[in-house]
Image (cartoon, grey):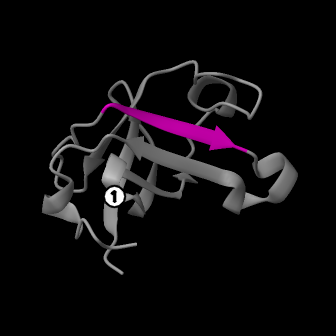
Amino acid sequence: MRTLPVDVLAGDLVIGAANLTPVDPSMGVVGAVFQPNSAYIPSRHSRSMEDTAPPTELSVRETNGRLLRCAGVDLIDLSSEVGDEGRELHVLGLEDYGRYFDERQL
């Protein structure tokens, strides 16, 4: 399955990376395990299951610097309960989905 390597940003600050894969092609949703860097602060950049929205607006860009146009980016951090695999990144309503993934691919 093809992946799309991206940087995850809070404003202009890169807080980590991910390798996006299809989650729900019909809705343009892709996701990945988030790989934080030293700039990542969970209380600022992510939410828990009880929160309705992350405290900071996030964006994603290709490794060549091109921002992905989408409806939103969601980062849920459950790593304190389940380990590093618990940092879930979802990109919602990805425009130009077919440019990155086969729309039938799951």
The residue most toward the right is: 81
Q: Name the residue located 33 percent from the left edge and 58 percent from the top edge.
A: 25
- Looking at the rendering, which quadrant does residue 30 occupy? bottom left
Residue under pointer 1 = 25
Residue at left offset 15%, top offset 49%:
96
Q: Above or below — where is 43 with respect to 84?
A: above
**In-image side of 18 versus 3 (left or right):** right
The segment highlighted magenta reads 71-77
Residue 35 showing in the rendered view: yes
Determine which quarter of the picture holds residue 100: bottom left
**Magenta part, dominant SS:** strand
Q: Which residue is at a point 20% across and 40% down the rendered structure image?
A: 67
User: Quadrant of the image for the C terminus?
Assistant: bottom left
Where residue 48 appears, as percent x and y from the top left, is 73, 33
Image side of residue 10 versus residue 70, left or right: right
Q: Nearer the viewer, residue 38 or 71?
A: 71
Q: Nearer the viewer, residue 100 or 27?
A: 27
Other residues around mark 1 within 10 Å, as few (<14) / some (14–19) / many (≥20): some
Q: Is residue 47 magenta?
A: no
Q: Nearer the viewer, residue 29 or 66?
A: 29
